[in-house]
Image: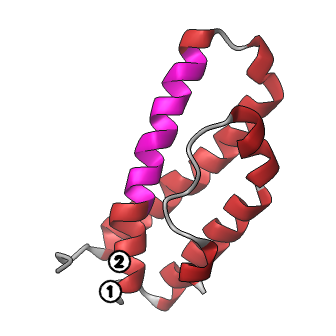
Amino acid sequence: MVGTITSEHVDKEIKISFLMLEELAEFSQEWDEIPDWKQDDWTLEWGQFLNKLKYVLHKAYQSGQMTPEQKNQYKELWSKLKEAAPTLKKLDPSPPPVSLAEVA
């Protein structure tokens, strides 16, 4: 069973998620010039992002712990992830841990 996730925690994680996607766009433009260590660092951050997406946001979404506004933001986040698919393939980070079909 999922523990209660506070609305403030959900808000924070949604905000961080959108920032991560903005960073994805920036990094992708400079990816080939970025040193390997920085690429590896970003890839680790991406993995942490995916874990929070799965174990915080998606769990809150599925268990009804999101406000209607948070649900809309979460769906927008997934829409942006879908749009970012070609960029994600270029950088080759791990794919999102839940399918888009689960966020309908």
Q: Position of residue 10 (x, y in %)?
A: 38, 69
Horizontal side of 67 relative to 94 (left or right) equals: left
* Residue assigned mark 1: 63
Q: Where does the C terminus fall, quadrant-wise?
A: bottom right
Any mark on residue 60, and which?
Answer: 2
Q: Secondary structure at mark 2?
A: helix
User: Do callouts 2 and 1 mark residues in contact (Cβ within 8 Å)?
Assistant: yes
Any mark on residue 79, and which?
Answer: none
The image quadrant of residue 38 is top right
64 is higher (above) or lower (below) than 3:
below
Closer-to-camera residue (41/67): 41
The image quadrant of residue 64 is bottom left
The image quadrant of residue 25 is top right
Q: Residues within 10 Å of mark 1 (few under 14, many from 20)?
A: some
Q: Residues within 10 Å of mark 2 (few under 14, many from 20)?
A: many
Residue at x-position 77% and y-position 36%: 90
Q: Is residue 10 magenta?
A: no
Residue at x-position 43% and y-position 87%: 67
Q: Position of residue 27 (x, y in %)?
A: 71, 30
Residue at x-position 35% and y-position 74%: 59
Residue at x-position 26% and y-position 73%: 6
Stretch of the chain drawn in magenta: 38-53
Q: Is residue 44 magenta?
A: yes
